[in-house]
């Protein structure tokens, strides 16, 4: 029990750090124009992911993501028993909610100023422009706008598919990068860097479509904060009623990515790579 408590504390702290870094850089980009390019935002997200893994990896394994935890519970149960799944999920949600609250506290005056400048009434249609640092929206409102034509570009089902693909790639690479049998790995201490770079790559590829969640806690925790902070139905269920895409998509895609690695890549290792 003591070990599980420390693991859960690490997941809270690590998820808080990762989500705080990521949502803060989105807030800075949206509200002030700083780091406004997609790649700049993606790189800072990558740094947040890497730093959070370095911080907590030795304690909890640094899942920091319900989809990652589910994948390990299903495909690496000796390393991560199923009984630990719900405590990890709860801890990740707590960390993400705390990150959303931190961003709201620090940026609240900037958010109000942005809303006044752009004639945005919090909670009205279109106010996703002032809450997109908390939850994600499809398509990316900062790139294509918030009118009906823009909203029609990506359906909720399409958004779920994008999130599944992105999360699948992320988990596929995580499984490869933490596998001791994979002799093509870089120095093991660089694995967090490459996991972060994978996140940056996927954001750069797919964020115009869904803003790039790949993590149910990262999306729903801050989204819940936005819901209670006045954005209401713009936060949950969202303009297209599709907030579920950021939960269902990753929870499907993560295990699929793990399955690709476990059944299609790992069995093909040469025999001498499978003896460790």
Image (cartoon, rainbow, N blue to C red):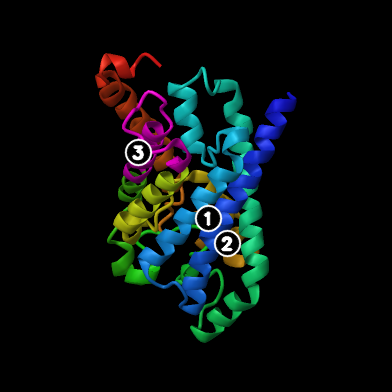
Image location (x, y in percent) of residue 121: 54, 77
Mark linked to residue 232: 2
Question: What quarter of the picture does the C terminus occupy?
Answer: top left
Q: Is residue 171 visible?
A: yes
**Disc 1 from disc 3: Cα separation:** 25 Å
Provide residue 244's location: percent of width, then percent of height. Answer: 45, 46
- The answer to whether marks 1 and 2 mark residues whose Cβ atoms lie closer than 8 Å is yes
Q: Is residue 82 above or below residue 185?
A: above
Kindly identify which numbered label has been placed on residue 236: 1
Using the numbered discs, state the Cα–Cα distance from disc 2 to disc 3 in whole angstroms: 30 Å
Q: Which dot marks residue 168?
A: 3
| Residue depth check, mark 1 versus mark 3: number of the one nearer the observer | 3
Identified at 65% across, 46% down, the residue is 13
Give the prevailing secondary structure in the magenta stretch: helix
Image quadrant where residue 5 sits: top right
Closest to the observer: 141 or 175? 175
Q: Which mark is residue 124?
A: none
Q: Which callout, 2 or 3, points at the residue further toward the start of the chain?
A: 3
Dots 2, 3 in contact, CB < 8 A: no
Judge left or right: residue 161 versus residue 24. left
Q: Does the magenta stretch include residue 56?
A: no
Residue 149, position as x, y percentages in the image: 28, 68
Q: Is residue 174 magenta?
A: yes
Give neighbour class at mark 3: few <14, some 14-19, many 20+ (Cα, 10 Å): many
Question: Which residue is rendered at x = 62% and y = 40% of the image?
Answer: 11
Query: Badge 1: few (under 14), some or many (20 or more) residues near its Cα, within 10 Å?
Result: many
Label 1 vs 3, first from the N-terminus: 3
- Cα gap from disc 1 to disc 2, whole angstroms: 6 Å
Residue 239 appears anywhere in the view: no
Q: Which residues lie in the magenta part?
A: 164-191
């Amino acid at each position: 029990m003591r070990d599980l408590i420390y693991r859960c504390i690490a997941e809270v702290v690590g998820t808080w750090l990762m989500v705080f870094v990521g949502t803060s850089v989105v807030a800075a980009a949206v509200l002030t124009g700083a780091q406004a390019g997609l790649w700049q935002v993606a790189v800072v997200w990558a740094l947040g992911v890497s730093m959070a893994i370095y911080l907590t990896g030795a304690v909890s394994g640094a899942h920091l993501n319900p989809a990652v935890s589910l994948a390990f519970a299903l495909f690496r149960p000796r390393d991560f028993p199923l009984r630990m799944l719900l405590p990890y999920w709860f801890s990740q949600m707590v960390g993400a909610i705390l990150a959303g609250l931190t961003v709201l506290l620090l940026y609240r005056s900037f958010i109000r100023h942005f809303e006044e400048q752009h004639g945005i009434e919090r909670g009205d249609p279109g106010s996703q422009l002032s809450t997109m640092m908390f939850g994600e929206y499809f398509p990316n409102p900062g790139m294509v706008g918030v009118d009906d034509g823009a909203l029609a570009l990506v359906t909720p089902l399409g958004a779920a598919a994008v999130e599944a693909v992105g999360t699948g790639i992320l988990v596929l690479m995580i499984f490869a990068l933490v596998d001791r049998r994979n002799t093509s790995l870089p120095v093991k201490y660089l694995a967090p860097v490459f996991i972060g770079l994978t996140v940056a790559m996927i954001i750069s590829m797919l964020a115009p479509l869904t803003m790039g969640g790949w993590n149910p806690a990262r999306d729903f925790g801050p989204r819940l904060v936005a819901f209670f902070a006045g954005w209401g139905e713009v936060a949950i269920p969202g303009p297209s009623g599709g907030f579920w895409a950021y939960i269902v998509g990753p929870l499907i895609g993560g295990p699929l990515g793990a399955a690709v690695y476990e059944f299609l890549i790992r069995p093909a290792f040469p025999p001498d790579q499978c003896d460790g």
